[in-house]
Image (cartoon, rainbow, N blue to C red):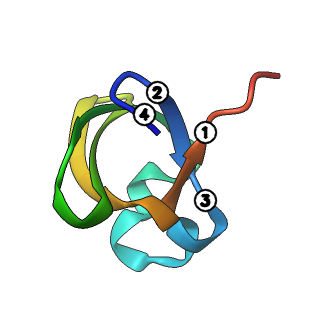
C-alpha cells in the first residue's frame, strides 16, 4: 500500500470494536507511519475522520 490508495476495513478490522464507525465506509491513506501503520482519512456523513490503522485492519477498495 502507498499514500493515496483507497481502502476499506478488512475482516480483521471489522472485528475491532474501536473501528465500528468506519465499517462499510471507504478511506484514503494520507500518511505512512512507523511499524506498518497507516493514517487513513475516512469518508463519513458528518465529515472526514482520520485514524491510525494497522495494515491487517485495512484492504484495498474494490471497484463495483
- Residue 26 badge: none
Give the answer, above or below, for where 4 lies relative to 55.
Answer: above
**CA–CA distance in space, label 1 to label 2:** 7 Å
Give left or right: position of 17 versus 39.
Answer: right
**CA–CA distance in space, label 3 to label 4:** 12 Å
**CA–CA distance in space, label 1 to label 3:** 9 Å
Of label 1 and label 2, which has the lower sequence position?
2
Give the answer, above or below, for where 15 lies relative to 40.
Answer: below
Badge 3 crowding class, 10 Å Cα cut-off, few under 14, some 14 to 19, many 20 or more, is: some
Q: Which residue is mark 3?
A: 10
Secondary element at image label 3: loop
Residue found at the very far right of the displayed protein: 64
- Residue 27 badge: 4
Q: Which residue is mark 1?
A: 60
The answer to whether the residues at label 4 and label 2 have Cβ atoms under 8 Å apart is no
Marks 4, 1: nearer the viewer: 1
Of label 1 and label 3, which has the lower sequence position?
3
The answer to whether the residues at label 4 and label 1 have Cβ atoms under 8 Å apart is no
Where is residue 22? Give x, y as percent: 44, 50
Of label 4 and label 1, which has the lower sequence position?
4
Of label 3 and label 2, which has the lower sequence position?
2
Front residue of 8 and 32 = 32
Q: Which residue is mark 2?
A: 5
The answer to whether the residues at label 1 and label 2 have Cβ atoms under 8 Å apart is yes
Of label 4 and label 2, which has the lower sequence position?
2
Secondary element at image label 2: loop
Place residue 16 in its image quadrant. Answer: bottom left
Amino acid at each position: 500500500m502507498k499514500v493515496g490508495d483507497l481502502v476499506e476495513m478488512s475482516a480483521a478490522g471489522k472485528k475491532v470494536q474501536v473501528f465500528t464507525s468506519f465499517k462499510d465506509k471507504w478511506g484514503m491513506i494520507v500518511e505512512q507511519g512507523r511499524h506498518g501503520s497507516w493514517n487513513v482519512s475516512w469518508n463519513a456523513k458528518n465529515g472526514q475522520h482520520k485514524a491510525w490503522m494497522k495494515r491487517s485492519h485495512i484492504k484495498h477498495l474494490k471497484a463495483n
